[in-house]
Image (tube, coloured by chain):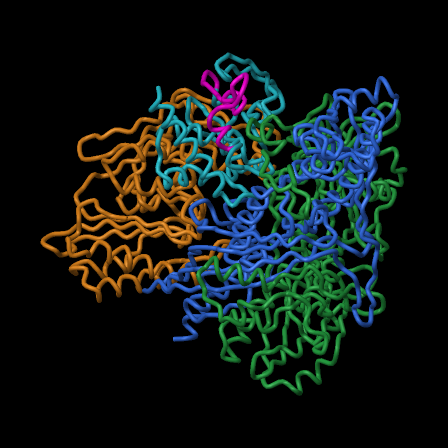
Chain colours: A green, B blue, C cyan, D orange
């Protein structure tokens, strides 16, 4: 960058800072409108069951009750948010029809004059449920005879004809055969809630000319608008989504969960409708980061070069897909780690179980791959008898290396970053490592 | 009872942006009668400071002061399309779109200035302080603000620009996994220092120190905010938080901030970082992106530090004090 | 169900509100009096984003029926922000980037104000203790602690000059 | 039910009258830090509620050799007294500053485990509770007050109006171990009061929190150190006894296995601290 920059690169004061330190900035649910209704959800109390009946008779008597919304009111009740980029099948139910697949699944939306009245009405809805066996472990869910979670097939997402996202590069079996050491590890994680300080929520407002304004704290306005348009079968130009301040997202606000039903409520009542998650809903019902089980098997030479890496990963998607199939693809693109490895085999499964659906969270599919790979690297270092820095410098990827998904590496700077980290913590690297760069390797070594 | 110390490291990279459906962002820029500029978007600011960094990129490209740019975003009636804020994509994608839109608006300013200064457009430059001048002849210069307002009433021209940036949709070969999944890569190397109480299994994180390489830093203070906030989140992922403490059992799921364990202000370690800037090949002013990756390297660095401290290597998260005690019992 | 009238002092002046029984102070401040700097992070007493001062003491307004503060003095961040400019603590949060999304910030600043009212030069441990009831998911707390410490220093210099 | 009426009686007799009128349908609330979250979330839907904030039960005073604490004295005010240091330690380890400004000592006795850290201290201090009903007051030792998980000797027509703590010499210590250092549920809470004569323990009260359906004494551990000089063998035996006899449970914060192990660890640490060479300091402690 030859030209000298004036603004980019400066730590200027944030343009929204005064609004934050005075609390004057308006967040979605800071707004309220005359005649605004409150939506509270009747949720499944069990993990997996047939839904045989819903009795609203007691709920309707509650003072302040206005109306209920069931699956029959939803124009396009079965959907999947990645349908916008061609992912299928449509498999999640805006409101349950005849089966519930996770504890907390939405069944009936109650609209009332006050939150207290809505909560009281929710407590008086009687559900006729016949419990079914549930499955919570990803590997059990893959066994024949396991309870089937999805309504369209077995318990894995199909990636263009395969039951997992695959990466095949080189020949891992040959690599293992040539290796001096075989190092294996199994790395597993639990679901994690994004837990933004502001819970997911929106307010839908009927406008004069048949349009609907929706104040929402989604992270993706058009993604939410387009999905709401499909679910409600309403042209997109009748929907006007407005964001503004978002009290933290971390991936927890890309599920298009509250906007469709709040807008449907506004349509059916011609009154503003507020649908905001309580903290316990955000904790227990909003989507989480997937739990992962990642098996790594490496073939390593005696001097510490990794010549084969086989990764088998299971992401626990919970009862529905949401964003998780995408996470598997991003996982597969990064599961081998920032290392130059000639033979790589990756199978990444998106598995369904009877728990809260999982979706996006900061690091989407890569965070837990980095956890597995970077603990595995220390395992390899120990086996080969070198220190953790050495094993990483020996295998670090460089510009021009062909990555397992066949895209040549560019903008790679792992080596320079590790060198800077060593200086920061006062770790004295050997001269050879200090001299290394991420510049492309000399051609005769080729893609290594 | 012993308190054992250990250090551990991790080195990671992280991709900027998405690919499966195409990853587009658009922006509009226009000058107002007062001569300041409005940037219109639909991208959302989650608190990471998108408005500020996009304002800086627009001001830099237009050659005006940062205070002269207003960001109007998050409204689908006025803002052109944007995919959304995730995947460390916003600064890279929205930044590129805003830069393109600002360049178009800047060109309109230069053409107007060329007329007024009776000079060739090619000879004109902006000084970054709101002035257009003939290159090398500071005396022949005009205020961009004046030009922008005269454009409205005198010339009847719009000073505006449209910009868009898209990483084209690229699918995945189902057999081999061949794909073009991202635009550039940021990097981090983290060293964590921990102290393990061998009687209670408690892990105190003493320090998290990282080197990051994130391409051009548009606002270094905001980059540091992501690194410090991410180090805390990584520590929380590694040692504390889960919605299912006994996964895959669904029992005992927390329902409030008391039961959902996250480190508090008392537990936060010393967090230090150094940031390298190797400009990316395709980001605005060499931007890469940093927001999404900053919890990643601290997690394995902490797990590796625990092993170094007490010889217990735990391969499942979160690493609870119970898991460490059971590991120590097994070693004994 | 008959409504009740409750009178309390808000930022120095008396206000009367008509509420259904046991409406929380949080709900009254946010939905009837426009004090939306009182945030709504959990309604369980676990996040601190709804902290207000009641007779100068920090309390969680989400757990307080408004009747309980009848006749008492309530101060929200709106009452701490001067009509023009910023309170020194707010300026310190701005300068130190002691915030990101801004949702926990009002609660943090109200607690910081209460702390400095009680103890003009708290130690770092005392700052950390005071913040233990306020959750932040973005910053990792260090910028917030540094903001409060710089406010303490600034107040100290102010003292020295006064 | 949506709340139809919320009473704030300004005397005990008025409160008892309301209790009599509404009977068991009346939800009695003190600081609200336990009841309000349940009401806010629609889990608890009471029709009529009584708050005791104004009922005149917020006095704390030393009366002879006893500290008398009104049921609605806030936890913050326990921090301001130093007549019974262990109560200051327990209050300081409970929740956060804002919650301590609202939560009450009486309310702490009804907090479900693993909450109720002040209650654990009161049990080790051999406190007594005063229950006031239409027929006047009766006092019950705290050790006999709880009858099971969330159940106690309090009759439907009574209110808990005060807690009385004997001020007696002895070595005390209090430790609350949680996954965080502040504002967090207990993994285990240990409160110890030892009567000591010439270096020998003549009387021991060890109370455990978050290790049973309510705060509980650990008689086996107490027996193991009574008559000892807190030598390591006795202390080790007491810790093992406490771990065996406690009724540890599993929740989202800790498993039964871990709680039981931590009971042993922290009873050991508490007694070891009291056995320091400087001799059991009266009222010393963590």
Position above or below: D212 against A13? below
Taking the image as drawn, is residue A268 in sight? no
Q: Quadrant of the N terminus of chain D?
A: top right
Q: Where is residue A400 in the image (x, y as percent from the top left)?
A: 72, 67
Q: Where is residue A358 in the image (x, y as percent from the top left)?
A: 69, 54
Residue C77 lies in magenta, yes or no? Answer: yes
Query: Is residue B213 or residue C112 the one in the foreground?
Result: B213
In the rendered image, the vertical position of residue A287 relative to residue C84, given as above or below = below
Image coordinates for residue C65, horizontal then vertical, percent: 52, 26
D235 or D205: nearer the viewer: D235
Q: Give the range drawn in magenta.
A: C70-93
Q: Residue A320 is drawn in which quadrant?
A: bottom right
Is B101 colored magenta in this rendering? no
Q: Which residue lies furthest to the left in this view?
A: D198
Q: Residue at x 50, y 28 (%)?
A: C91
**Seen in the image, is A274 located left or right of residue D54?**
right
Q: Which residue is drawn at 35% across and 40% down?
A: D92
């Amino acid at each position: 960058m030859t030209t000298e920059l004036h603004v980019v690169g400066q730590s200027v004061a944030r343009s929204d800072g005064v609004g934050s330190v005075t609390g004057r900035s308006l967040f979605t649910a800071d707004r309220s409108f005359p005649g605004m209704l409150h939506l509270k959800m009747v949720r499944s109390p069990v993990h997996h069951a047939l839904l045989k009946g819903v009795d609203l008779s007691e709920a309707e008597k509650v003072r302040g009750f206005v109306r209920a919304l069931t699956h029959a009111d939803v124009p396009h009740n079965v959907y999947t948010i990645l349908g916008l980029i061609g992912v299928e099948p449509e498999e999640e139910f805006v409101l349950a029809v005849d089966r519930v697949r996770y504890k907390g699944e939405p069944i009936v939306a109650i609209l009332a004059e006050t939150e207290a009245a809505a909560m009281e009405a929710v407590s008086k809805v009687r559900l006729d449920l016949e419990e079914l066996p549930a499955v919570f472990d990803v590997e059990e869910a893959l066994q024949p005879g396991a309870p089937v979670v999805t309504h369209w097939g077995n318990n894995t997402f199909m990636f263009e004809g395969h039951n997992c996202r695959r990466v095949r590069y080189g020949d891992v079996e040959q690599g293992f055969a040539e290796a001096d050491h075989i190092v294996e590890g199994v790395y597993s994680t639990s679901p994690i809630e994004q837990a933004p300080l502001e819970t997911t929520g929106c307010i839908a407002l009927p406008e004069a000319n048949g349009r609907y304004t929706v104040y929402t704290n989604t992270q993706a306005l058009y993604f939410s608008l387009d999905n709401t348009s499909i679910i409600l079968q309403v042209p997109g130009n009748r929907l006007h989504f407005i964001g503004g301040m978002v009290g933290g997202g971390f991936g927890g606000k890309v599920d298009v969960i509250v906007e469709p039903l709040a807008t449907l409520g506004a349509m059916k009542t011609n009154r503003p409708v507020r649908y905001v998650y309580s903290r316990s809903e955000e904790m227990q019902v909003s989507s989480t980061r997937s739990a992962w089980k990642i098996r790594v098997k490496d073939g390593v030479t005696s001097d510490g070069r990794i010549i084969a890496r086989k990764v088998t990963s299971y992401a626990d998607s919970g009862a529905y897909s949401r964003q998780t199939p995408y996470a598997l693809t991003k996982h597969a693109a990064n599961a081998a780690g920032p290392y130059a490895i000639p033979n790589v085999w990756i199978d990444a499964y998106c598995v369904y179980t009877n728990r809260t659906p999982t979706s996006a969270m900061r690091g989407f599919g890569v965070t837990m791959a980095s956890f597995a790979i970077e603990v595995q690297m220390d395992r390899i270092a120990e086996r080969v008898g070198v220190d953790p820095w050495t094993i990483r410098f020996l295998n670090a990827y460089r510009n021009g290396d062909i990555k397992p998904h066949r895209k040549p590496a560019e903008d790679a700077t792992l080596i320079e970053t590790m060198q800077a980290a060593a200086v920061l913590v006062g770790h004295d690297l050997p001269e050879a490592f200090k001299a290394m760069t991420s510049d492309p390797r000399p051609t005769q070594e080729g893609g290594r | 009872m012993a308190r054992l110390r250990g250090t551990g490291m991790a080195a990671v990279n992280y991709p900027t942006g998405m690919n499966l459906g195409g990853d587009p962002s658009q922006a509009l820029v226009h000058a107002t009668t007062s001569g300041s500029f409005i940037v219109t978007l639909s991208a959302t600011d989650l608190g990471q400071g998108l408005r500020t960094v996009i304002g800086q990129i627009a001001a830099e490209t237009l050659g005006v002061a940062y205070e002269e740019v207003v960001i109007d975003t998050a409204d689908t009636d006025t803002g052109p399309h944007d995919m959304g804020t995730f995947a460390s994509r916003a600064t890279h994608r929205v930044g590129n779109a805003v830069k393109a839109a600002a360049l178009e608006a800047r060109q309109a300013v230069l053409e107007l200035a060329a007329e007024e200064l009776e000079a060739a457009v090619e000879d004109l430059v902006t000084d970054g302080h709101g002035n257009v001048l003939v290159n090398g002849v500071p005396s022949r210069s005009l205020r961009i603000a004046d030009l922008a307002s005269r454009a409205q009433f005198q010339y009847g021209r719009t000073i505006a620009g449209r910009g868009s940036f898209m990483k084209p949709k690229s699918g995945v070969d189902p057999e081999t996994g061949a794909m073009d999944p991202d635009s550039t890569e940021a990097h981090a190397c983290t060293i964590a220092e921990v102290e393990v109480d061998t009687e209670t299994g408690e892990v105190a994180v003493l320090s998290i120190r990282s080197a990051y390489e994130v391409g051009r830093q548009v606002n270094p203070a905001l980059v540091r905010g992501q690194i410090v906030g991410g180090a805390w989140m990584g520590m929380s992922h590694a040692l504390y938080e889960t919605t299912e403490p006994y996964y895959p059992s669904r029992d005992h799921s927390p329902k409030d901030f008391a039961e959902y364990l996250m480190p508090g202000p008392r537990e936060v370690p010393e967090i230090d970082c150094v940031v390298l800037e190797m400009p990316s090949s395709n980001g605005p002013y060499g931007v890469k992106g940093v927001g999404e990756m900053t919890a990643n390297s601290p997690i394995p660095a902490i797990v590796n530090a625990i092993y170094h401290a007490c010889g217990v290597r735990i391969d499942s998260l979160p690493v609870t004090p119970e898991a460490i005690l059971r590991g120590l019992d097994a070693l004994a | 169900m008959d409504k009740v009238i409750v009178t309390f002092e808000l930022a120095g002046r008396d206000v009367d509100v008509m509420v259904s029984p046991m409406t929380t102070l949080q709900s009254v401040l946010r939905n009837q009096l426009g004090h939306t700097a009182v945030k709504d992070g959990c309604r369980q007493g676990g996040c601190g984003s709804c902290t207000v001062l009641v007779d100068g003491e920090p309390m969680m307004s989400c757990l307080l029926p408004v009747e309980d503060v009848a006749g008492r003095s309530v101060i929200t961040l709106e009452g701490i922000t001067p009509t023009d400019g910023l309170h020194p603590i707010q300026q310190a949060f701005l300068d130190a980037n002691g915030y990101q999304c801004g949702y926990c910030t009002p609660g943090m600043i109200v607690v910081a104000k209460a702390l400095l009212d009680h103890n003009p030069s708290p130690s770092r441990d005392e700052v950390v203790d005071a913040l233990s009831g306020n959750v932040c998911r973005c910053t990792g707390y260090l910028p917030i602690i540094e903001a409060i410490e710089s406010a303490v220093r600034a107040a100290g210099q102010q003292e020295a000059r006064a | 039910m949506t709340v139809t009426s919320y009473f704030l009686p300004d005397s005990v007799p008025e409160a008892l009258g309301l209790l009599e009128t509404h009977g068991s349908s009346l939800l009695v609330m003190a600081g609200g830090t336990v009841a309000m979250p349940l009401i806010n979330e629609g889990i608890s839907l009471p029709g009529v509620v009584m708050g005791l904030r104004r009922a005149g039960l917020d006095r704390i005073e030393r009366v002879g050799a006893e500290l008398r604490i009104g049921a609605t004295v806030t936890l913050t005010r326990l921090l301001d007294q130093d007549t019974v240091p262990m109560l200051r330690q327990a209050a300081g380890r409970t929740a956060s500053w804002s919650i301590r400004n609202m939560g009450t000592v009486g309310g702490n006795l009804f907090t479900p485990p693993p909450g109720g850290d002040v209650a654990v201290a009161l049990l080790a201090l051999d406190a007594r509770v005063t229950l006031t009903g239409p027929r006047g007051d009766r006092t019950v030792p705290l050790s006999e007050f709880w009858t099971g998980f969330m159940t106690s000797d309090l009759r439907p027509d009574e209110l808990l109006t005060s807690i009385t703590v004997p001020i007696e010499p002895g070595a005390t210590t209090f430790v609350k171990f949680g996954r965080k250092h502040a504002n967090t549920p207990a993994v285990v809470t240990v409160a110890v009061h030892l009567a000591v004569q010439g270096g020998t323990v003549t009387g021991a009260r060890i109370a455990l929190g978050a290790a049973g359906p309510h705060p509980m004494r650990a008689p086996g551990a107490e027996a193991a150190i009574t008559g000892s000089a807190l030598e390591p063998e006795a202390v080790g035996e007491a810790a093992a006894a406490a771990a065996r006899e406690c009724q540890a449970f599993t929740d989202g914060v800790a498993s039964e296995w871990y709680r039981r192990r931590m009971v042993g660890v922290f009873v050991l640490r508490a007694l070891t601290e009291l056995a320091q060479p400087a001799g059991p300091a009266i009222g010393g402690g963590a």
